[in-house]
Image (tube, rainbow, N blue to C red):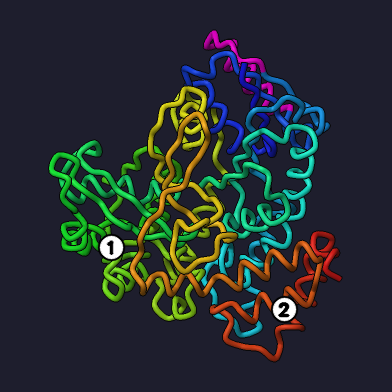
Amino acid sequence: MTKIVMIGAGSLQFGAGMLGDIFQSTLLVDAEIVLNDINEKAATATLKMAQEFIAANGLKQRISVESDLAKALKGADFVLISIEVGDRFKLWDMDWKIPQQYGIQQVYGENGGPGGLFHSLRIIPPILEICRSVSEVSPDATIFNFSNPMSRICTTVHRAFPELKFIGMCHEIASLERHLAPLLGVSRDQIHYRAAGLNHFSVLADVIYTDSGESAYEDVRAKAPAYFSALPGYSEILNYTREKQRAINTEGWMEVDLSEVPVKRQWSDRWLFRDILEQFNLLPITYDSHFGEYIQWAHEVSDHRGILDFYTLYRHHLGDSKPAIKLELHERVVPIIEGMLADRKYEEGAVNIPNNGHLRNLPDWMVVEVPAYIDASGIQGINVDLPSGFTGLLTNQIGVHDMTAEAVLRKSRDCVIQALLVDPVVTVAKQIPDLVDHMIQEQSPWLDYLG
């Protein structure tokens, strides 16, 4: 029997989606699932939904709520983490807009730049406490993290607990995968691709036609401008949802049908994507402006209307959606678990793991996003060769990740200041200490440890 512990299961979005993934698995039919959340009432609501679904569909999984983390983790084979702290969007607003008031031109402010730093400073300490419990109770368990900022969380965890099997998971690569086949005019099984970089900052490394073994990248480059410039962006999707009063889910691995959404602006929300394609001759895995969180010149070339419309759409989607369990795959963690349990020896598109030579010019300790082989022995990253220009953008993040980890582990305000001053997105200096003090005060109690 496989035991899976879901931490943060009080979130119905995470709980419903992940339970659906588990319930559709043919290898996890007798799994024991334990729900854990600091909000036991919310976890109990997820439990009730799951029990009703199990009864209605004649399933055999056993499911329970355990608020004591140590008890929940006893005997765990796999641990899934998806947590946030505080009011997510209220804090995100601070992460994004307060640094802008101090003269820092950042986009989004969620995973990269100053916003990504303050997000990291809040969320990494509780994740470290979870990892401490895993190391004490079930040190052989494999941990899958879904929380952002992904690469900073994973880098810090591996520095604090190098012995843990801690894997970062993100479905952003699906944004690329779902478009490659139609762009090339083939079915998905006729191509094989690899992408790599940092989470939300990865590019397509190569794509081949499986029948001939020949590279299809030049075909992708040639066809990408016409294909992506004609796709609706978040501004069009937001307008459509307002007019039709019907939400469109653009997240996860499922197909996304945008055929009814009219395109009003060419390259909508893809101005930065277009510049990377034109200047670096590379295809980002994410075709909106999230890529710009790591680039100092991104503010100049991004579609700011598209950014704001994405934020509005995402905020409303999380607030208005009514999660339900469905027997369909939303994330990739269950196929990975199945691959490990059944020794399937297959290649997974993207995992977040310590570099260990997978990407050149980046240190081994830094967590990168690369494809990986999955089998009974676990998860083995695959080395990927990326062009020097993009590698240069990646190396700009070395000091950022290093000092973020140091700031958390040393509980150091000075390291926070240094983390900002080594960030390429930060182009001012004089008021950085004031910005840090302001954020520590505004985001109390989560940043009190830095005072």
Q: Quadrant of residue 448?
A: bottom right
Q: Mark 2: which secondary structure?
A: helix
Closest to the observer, 46 or 419: 419
Residue type at numbered disc 1: Lys
Amino acid type at mark 2: Ile
Specify the farthest residue to the bottom: 430
Q: Identify the secondary structure beneath mark 1.
A: loop
- Residue 259 in picture, x, y percent from top left: 26, 46
Residue 239 seen: no
Horizontal side, residue 211 vs residue 48: left or right: left
Q: Is residue 276 above or below residue 129?
A: below
Please state which of the two labelled residues, at mark 2 or mark 1, is closer to the viewer. Answer: 2
Q: Quadrant of the N terminus?
A: top right
Q: Residue at x 34, y 50 (%)?
A: 194
Q: CA distance from mark 2 to mark 1?
A: 43 Å
194 sits left or right of 419 in the view: left
Label 2, on which residue?
417
The mark nearer the N terminus, 2 or 1, is: 1
Instruction: Give the prevailing secondary structure in the magenta stretch.
Output: helix
The residue carrying mark 1 is: 264
Image quarter (top left, top right, bottom left or bottom right) of the C terminus:
bottom right
- Counting from the top left corner in percent of width and height, residue 197 is at 44, 60
Start and end of the magenta stretch? 44-62
